[in-house]
Amino acid sequence: MIEPTNPFLFQIKEVFKKQSSSNSELIFEILNLLIFQDSKNRDTVLLYKSLELKEFIKVCSLLDGRTIKLPTKQQIEDNLLTSLLYYEKEILHNDWPSIKKKYPQFEISSIKYSLQIKKLDEFILLRVADLFKHLSKEEKDKV
């Protein structure tokens, strides 16, 4: 069911506790119809169908009507592979030939992923430096 994250959701959860499961199911079917009716585009419906109700409500609460641009399927796949390769290269210190041999199912361009790993390393260094700036002198001395 819905975890109460605000007073309204808490009140709704209390109401649902008093409903029979068949009544709750019917109410959720009505909610489905309302979501489909109110959806201005197909993407909202796809997102709604893809998530549990609790997660959909959480996303709607976070965005509160704002529009966001999500990564493409290819970008997500590329980021997943990059994270795996980052782990292999930077954490385990494997070389590219052994990484390619370990993951023959992926087309791994050592040049492409070396650049992405370098960009990620630079991003991490910038974030650490930014975090370090906000530490007190005593906290910096401990580091």
Image (cartoon, rainbow, N blue to C red):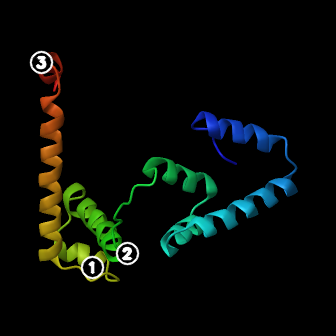
Q: Which residue is mark 2?
A: 73
Place of residue 26 in the rendered image (x, y in percent of width and height, measured from the top left): 81, 60
Q: Which residue is mark 1?
A: 101
**Residue in the foreground of this view, choosing between 9 and 127:** 9
Q: Disc 2 marks which amino acid?
A: Lys
* Local SS, label 1: helix
The quarter holding residue 138 reads: top left
* Local SS, label 2: helix
Q: Is residue 80 above or below residue 140?
A: below
Relative placement, left or right, of 30 versus 49 is: right
Q: Is residue 11 above or below residue 66?
A: above
Q: Residues within 10 Å of mark 1 (few under 14, many from 20)?
A: few
Q: Disc 1 marks which amino acid?
A: Lys
Contact check, label 3 and label 2, Cβ < 8 Å: no
The residue under the point 17% across, 28% down is 134
Q: Which residue is mark 3?
A: 137
Place of residue 103 in the rendered image (x, y in percent of width and height, measured from the top left): 32, 77
Contact check, label 1 and label 3, Cβ < 8 Å: no
Question: Which comes before the other along the chain, label 1 or label 2?
Answer: 2
Q: Is residue 76 above or below residue 107?
A: above
On residue 87, the disc is none
Question: Which comes before the other along the chain, label 3 or label 2?
Answer: 2
**Residue in the foreground of this view, choosing between 10 and 82:** 10
